[in-house]
Amino acid sequence: MMPPAFEYMAPTDVDEAIDLLNRYGDDAKILAGGQSLLPLLKSRITSIPYLISLSEVKDISYITDGKNSLKIGAMTLDADLEYSPTVRKNFPILSDALGQLADPLVRNMGTVGGNLSHGDPSNDLPSVMLALDATFKIRGKSGEREVHSRDFYMDTFVTALEHGEILTEISVPYWPAASGGAYVKFRKGTWNFSVAGVAVQLQLDNEIVKKAGIAITSMGPTALKASEAENYLKGKKLTAENVRHAAELVVAASQPSSDSYGSVEYKKEILRRISVQAIKKAQTRAEVK
Ligand SMILES: Cc1cc2nc3c(=O)[nH]c(=O)nc-3n(C[C@H](O)[C@H](O)[C@H](O)COP(=O)(O)OP(=O)(O)OC[C@H]3O[C@@H](n4cnc5c(N)ncnc54)[C@H](O)[C@@H]3O)c2cc1C
């Protein structure tokens, strides 16, 4: 189906895009890779009279090694992040998620900022950013602010972004040596989105967990942080019993609803199993560092 008519604008810098957003108010929206917004327009679920494309804003597409964190420009393509050597080396949890995100066609068009800004609880990158403790840089008419990923997701398709604001950069802190992470996603058939996904990042010290970051995908109104599981693992060895108990706490943090993917109990059982897998995989990666 064709989308409803819209006016397309392609400013060349972020401030110009912010001016346009403010000029057209609720009638305007940012267009990044279009991989979520265009299907919504084509299915006529929504109509947006003014689309402000960021495709010509060249200075928010980068992957830079900062002093304490990896800086990712919001317009960085998913595929560029997937193949970045620094991501492969330092953040295998991100490589896991990106390699399973949709298909190469979508990853060649979709952007990291779009995936995070859309607020879809089934998108894979929000839970990874929650597990890694990432922060988001947001720019609006009154200047720039930083929001921690844990404060960004408010409800389904509702984020801390206010109208007229643009997500410009994602900052992912480097975890100390002896850290490792993994993202495990369970899908049904050929459908891309997960029944459940879980992101686990661990820092170990002599086999003891010093810090844990755990978050879940597709199991509630937003990506959810499993804080009790994180706190439980802190100071403990990853014995089979402790891993099993942590997985139970991940399940307790979830808020699934029954739908065409399966019942609540089915989804919880999937999450239980993939949580154990993700913790073990993160442990192995932390140990080989
Ligand atoms: C067939 C298919 C399968 C998919 N499977 C998956 C999957 O398995 N996992 C997954 O995670 N995703 C999946 N997606 C979604 C995909 O990852 C999208 O690319 C992503 O959700 C949105 O990124 P985008 O750059 O295309 O943003 P757009 O579609 O252009 O924008 C999405 C929303 O975010 C807003 N926005 C975008 N960028 C910014 C910004 N910088 N600042 C403020 N607001 C902004 C837009 O206004 C819009 O509301 C799939 C998509 C398709 C079409």
Image (spheres, helix red, strand yellow):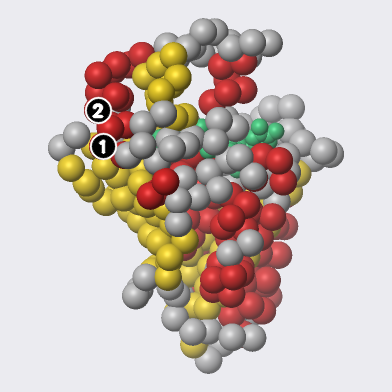
Q: Quadrant of residue 51?
A: top left
**Rendered residue at 19%/34% (across/down):** 141
**Rendered residue at 31%/50% (across/down):** 137
Quadrant location of the C terminus in the rendered image: bottom right
Judged left or right of residue 234, residue 11 is left
Q: Quadrant of residue 96?
A: bottom right
**How far across and how far down the image is residue 16, in percent?**
28, 32
The residue singled out by tag 2 in the image is 19
The amino acid at mark 2 is Asp
Query: Which residue is outermost to the right?
Result: 189
- Is the C-beta separation of discs 1 and 2 under 8 Å? yes
Residue 65: in sight, yes or no?
Answer: yes
**Rendered residue at 66%/79% (across/down):** 284
**Rendered residue at 74%/33% (across/down):** 261
Quadrant location of the N terminus in the rendered image: top right
Q: Is residue 60 above or below residue 174?
A: above
Specify few, some or many for label 2: CA neighbours under 10 Å numbering under 14, 14-19, or 20 or more: some
The residue singled out by tag 1 in the image is 15
Judged left or right of residue 225, residue 67 is left
The amino acid at mark 1 is Asp
Residue 134: in sight, yes or no?
Answer: no
Please state the quadrant of the image where ligand 1 appears. Answer: top right
**How far across and how far down the image is residue 288, in percent?**
64, 86
Separation of marks 1 and 2 at Cα, in angstroms:
6 Å
Judged left or right of residue 260, residue 253 is left
Specify few, some or many for label 1: CA neighbours under 10 Å numbering under 14, 14-19, or 20 or more: some
Query: Which residue is outermost to the left?
Result: 142
Q: Is residue 286 or residue 9 the one in the foreground?
A: 9
